[in-house]
Amino acid sequence: MRIACFETTPTDSDRLSVALSGNDLRFFPEPLSEKNVELAKDCEAISVFIYSEVSADLLSRLPVLRAVATRSTGFDHIDLDACRKRDIAVMNVPSYGENTVAEHTFALILALSRNVHKSYARGRKGDYSIEGLMGFDLKDKTLGVIGTGHIGLHVIRIAKGFGMHVLAFDTHHDTFLSEILHFRYAPLHEVLAESDIVTLHIPLLESTRHFMDRDKISKMKQGSLLINTSRGGIVDNRALIEGLDRGILAGAGLDVIEGEEHIREENQCLHRSCSARKAEHAAENRDLLHHDNVVFTPHIGFYSREAIDRILDTTAENLNAFADGNPTNTVR
Ligand code: NAD
């Protein structure tokens, strides 16, 4: 098969070249976009990460495409309806780093609870004072986990190690695991009102876009923390900024931010013409990231050596299985 792999590093291409030997492979560091779609025009398969917007328009310019293998769990960057119409298989990596993202969730929680980010910034300036850096214990605090799937359950397991109480909200209840891991499912309003820290682990769907809006943030416990390692679009940026400014939230830990794809292009957005919504996102993100009670990382929750190896191996297995006529991990 002719396969074009976008958003790849040299390490990715080395590992995929071995696992997909026998195929005609091309590797590109940049995301697939309208600007470079020609690179894949004769390919039967493409492999992308989350910054490639696989839209209907773009698919229409890939006439022989039969498979899309995303090197991620989420697939909201791929137009599934358009793929269905063209009978293009879409395969994902259903699990590769539940513990990886859960560990990163705690990196954000601990940074905020112990002011690691503020201490680091001061230390860089030669300031070794401790005024204003008093943190709080996680032990005996309540963690609200929204979404108790692969990642959420690992977050709960780790929280229990810290001696935290856990309240959870999910549309699907796993009573067996709630007994084993000693957590309780509760209605959303109770999770929001009772939790010292709320952490989000639900997928981004049309129905969950802006799940955390002004109304839900206003129902959170005064002075609590909000952590998002799921998808930026789950939280309404404007509502988040307002929640921080009004003191409802004492801080936010964000590995994902609505419109994060535009942050890299921020300068272009400020100085050149770009869509109004893009420019708005860029301005909101600038505002958000300048709050000293916001800890952010550039979508690296998944990014550990072990997780990357698992992602690449599953992606190669998906493409090999598709070539053999037995597709696995299809999401459509
Ligand atoms: P999962 O599918 O295993 O679990 C999602 C859970 O959310 C399920 O239990 C589901 O029942 C629940 N859910 C769905 N809609 C809901 C709703 N409206 N209200 C309440 N619960 C709802 O997913 P996962 O593997 O645990 O991943 C969770 C999120 O993490 C996804 O958004 C994924 O894109 C994101 N993610 C981020 C990174 C990163 O690098 N930051 C890496 C991997 C995954």
Image: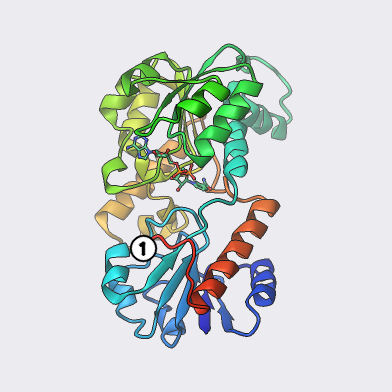
Mark 1 surroundings: few (<14), some (14-19) or many (≥20) residues within 10 A: few
Residue 2, given in percent of the width and then of the height, sits at: 51, 85
Residue 215 pos. (x, y %): 26, 26
Q: In the rendered view, how is the structure colored? A: rainbow
- Where is residue 36? Give x, y as percent: 43, 78
Query: Which residue lies under the disc numbered 1?
Result: 332
In this rendered view, identify the residue nearer to me: 285 or 110: 110
> From where the camera sits, is residue 114 visible?
no
As shown in the figure, which amino acid type bears the numbered disc 1? Answer: Arg
Question: How many labels sit on residues?
Answer: 1
Q: Position of residue 19 (x, y in %)?
A: 66, 73
- SS at circle 1: loop
Q: Is residue 49 visible?
A: yes
Mark 1, ligand 1, within 8 Å: the answer is no
Q: Residue at x 31, y 32 (%)?
A: 239
Residue displayed at 59% across by 69% down: 316
In this rendering, position of residue 87 left or right of residue 195: left
Q: Quadrant of ligand 1?
A: top left
Question: Where is 77 relative to 42, above or below?
Answer: above
Instruction: Locate the C terminus and report the quarter of the image it occupies.
Output: bottom left
Quarter where residue 261 is shown = bottom left
Residue ID at (60%, 14%): 136
Q: Quadrant of residue 297?
A: top right
Of 320 and 243, which appears nearest the observer?
320
Report the residue at 62% width, 51% height from top. Answer: 303
Q: Is residue 113 above or below residue 3?
A: above
In this view of the protein, which residue sits in the foreground, 59 or 285? 59
